[in-house]
Image (cartoon, rainbow, N blue to C red):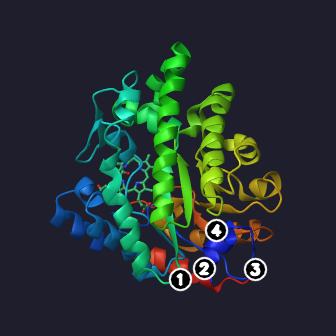
């Protein structure tokens, strides 16, 4: 008996709306902060399979979500491809040296750096009940490339967008190398026990329409086609954040099973424009969860109603913020659990 999250991602609509929250394993939880302090930082945690499995399980124990997401990061792919990766306190990720032309040699070498992550999947899946779905993930090529090229998070991804215009052939080659690594990585996650995967394209929203076709839709479509060819049973959730009205083309053209809807999109628009019967995931504003109160309650109701006629996975429109009060999450869970569609 699969859980209600997996059922929903496969296209069924039941009475109970399944829920999980992006970034549910992380800094808003005191038990996460304690373990992080003990182990000496985020990256040490991500490669410590037992610690990482424990972190994936923390939000399940506390809130009983329907999905447990693997505790890792989208940037382990460039790390495995040979870039150094570290996190500057209070600032975010750093990657060096720049890796564009040498990416193909890199692909042939260091992918075994990812082995502890598959062990995390095995440990987490073994500790979960059958009602909880184990979710894997990877960054989509465009989003991962923006970090590889800039060496860090960047404002509007300007350096990478300029590179893609200046030298589309070199950029296409980088995207293709990331695609190959990502398919291998997701297949290995599936073989270790994940039951659905999410492709995070967090910076899809900065691209002009023709560039969006080329660097968001096409790579996600190629990855999805390969996953379908290799592991056809596993649903793929595509989350191209910031896509606006281009989400409709993404949903139709990539072959993903379900789409993540961010909080800038009107859920009534999404319910109308996305292909009939396609499962959607979203789309509460994470800042409203942080703020709490009556406005939160009303909006949760609105999102649930907007998606009442199709398979719906309740989630945020983006990751939960680190200052979100635990009581707000508890109230959200109670509301979604008691909702009668
Ligand atoms: O709970 C989960 O969702 C599981 C794990 C997860 C992490 N990162 C852990 C993490 C997932 C799915 C991600 C995805 C991720 N990582 C994305 C795509 C989704 C998004 O949020 O847009 C991106 C762009 C990254 C890159 C990244 N990782 C950044 C920019 C940062 C630093 C800024 C920040 O938000 O903290 C990270 C670090 C990171 N990844 C943390 C966690 C829990 C925080 C590390 C810490 O300080 O403890």
Give the mark nearer the N terminus: 2 vs 3. 2
Q: Is residue 337 above or below residue 83?
A: below
- Quadrant of the drawing holding the N terminus: bottom right
Q: Nearer the viewer, residue 23 or 290?
A: 23
Label 2: few (<14), some or many (≥20) within 10 Å?
A: some
List the residue tagged with mark 2: 3
Give the mark nearer the N terminus: 3 vs 4. 4
* Callout 1: SS: loop
List the residue tagged with mark 1: 130
Q: Of discs 2 and 3, which sits in the foreground?
A: 2
Q: Of discs 2 and 4, which sits in the foreground?
A: 2
List the residue tagged with mark 4: 313
- Queried on whether the Cβ of the residue with tag 1 lies below 8 angstroms from ligand 1, the answer reads no
**Image quadrant of residue 279?**
bottom right
Give the mark nearer the N terminus: 2 vs 4. 2
CB within 8 Å, label 1 to label 3: no
- Queried on whether the Cβ of the residue with tag 2 lies below 8 angstroms from ligand 1, the answer reads no
* Callout 3: SS: loop
Decide if residue 11 is on the left or right side of residue 67. right
List the residue tagged with mark 3: 341
- What's the CA distance linking mark 1 and mark 2? 7 Å
Decide if residue 285 is on the left or right side of residue 119. right
CB within 8 Å, label 1 to label 4: no
**Image quadrant of residue 165?**
top right
* Callout 2: SS: loop
- Queried on whether the Cβ of the residue with tag 3 lies below 8 angstroms from ligand 1, the answer reads no
Query: Residue 103: horizontal and vertical position, in percent?
Result: 39, 28
Q: Is residue 224 above or below residue 49?
A: above
- What's the CA distance linking mark 2 and mark 3? 19 Å
- What's the CA distance linking mark 3 and mark 4? 13 Å
Give the mark nearer the N terminus: 1 vs 4. 1
């Amino acid at each position: 008996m699969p859980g209600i999250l997996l059922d929903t991602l496969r296209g069924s609509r039941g009475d109970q709306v399944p829920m999980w929250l992006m970034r549910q394993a992380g800094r808003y939880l005191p038990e996460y902060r304690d373990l992080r302090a003990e182990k000496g930082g985020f990256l040490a945690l991500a490669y410590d399979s037992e610690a990482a499995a424990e972190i994936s399980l923390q939000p399940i124990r506390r809130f009983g979500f329907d999905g447990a997401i693997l505790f890792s990061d989208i940037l382990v792919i460039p790390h495995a491809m040979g870039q150094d990766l570290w996190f500057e306190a209070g600032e975010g990720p750093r990657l060096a040296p720049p890796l564009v032309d040498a990416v193909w040699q890199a692909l042939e070498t260091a992918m075994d750096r990812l082995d502890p992550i598959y062990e995390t999947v095995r440990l987490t899946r073994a500790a979960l009940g059958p009602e909880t779905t184990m979710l894997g993930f990877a960054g989509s090529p465009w989003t991962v490339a923006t970090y590889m090229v800039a060496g860090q998070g960047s404002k509007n991804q300007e350096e990478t967008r300029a590179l893609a215009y200046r030298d589309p052939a070199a950029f296409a080659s980088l995207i293709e190398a990331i695609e190959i690594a990502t398919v291998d990585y997701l297949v290995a996650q599936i073989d270790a026990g994940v039951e659905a995967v999410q492709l995070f394209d967090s910076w899809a929203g900065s691209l002009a329409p023709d560039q969006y076709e080329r660097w968001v839709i096409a790579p996600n479509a190629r990855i999805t086609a390969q996953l379908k060819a290799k592991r056809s049973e596993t649903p793929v959730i595509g989350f191209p954040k910031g896509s606006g009205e281009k989400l409709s083309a993404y949903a139709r053209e990539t072959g993903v099973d379900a789409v993540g809807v961010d909080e800038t999109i009107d859920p009534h628009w999404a319910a109308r424009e996305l292909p009939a019967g396609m499962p959607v995931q979203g789309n509460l504003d994470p800042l409203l969860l942080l703020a709490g109160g009556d406005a939160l309650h009303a909006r949760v109701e609105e999102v649930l109603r907007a998606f009442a006629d199709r398979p719906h996975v309740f989630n945020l429109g983006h990751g939960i913020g680190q200052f979100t009060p635990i009581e707000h999450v508890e109230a959200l869970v109670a509301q979604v659990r008691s909702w009668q569609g």
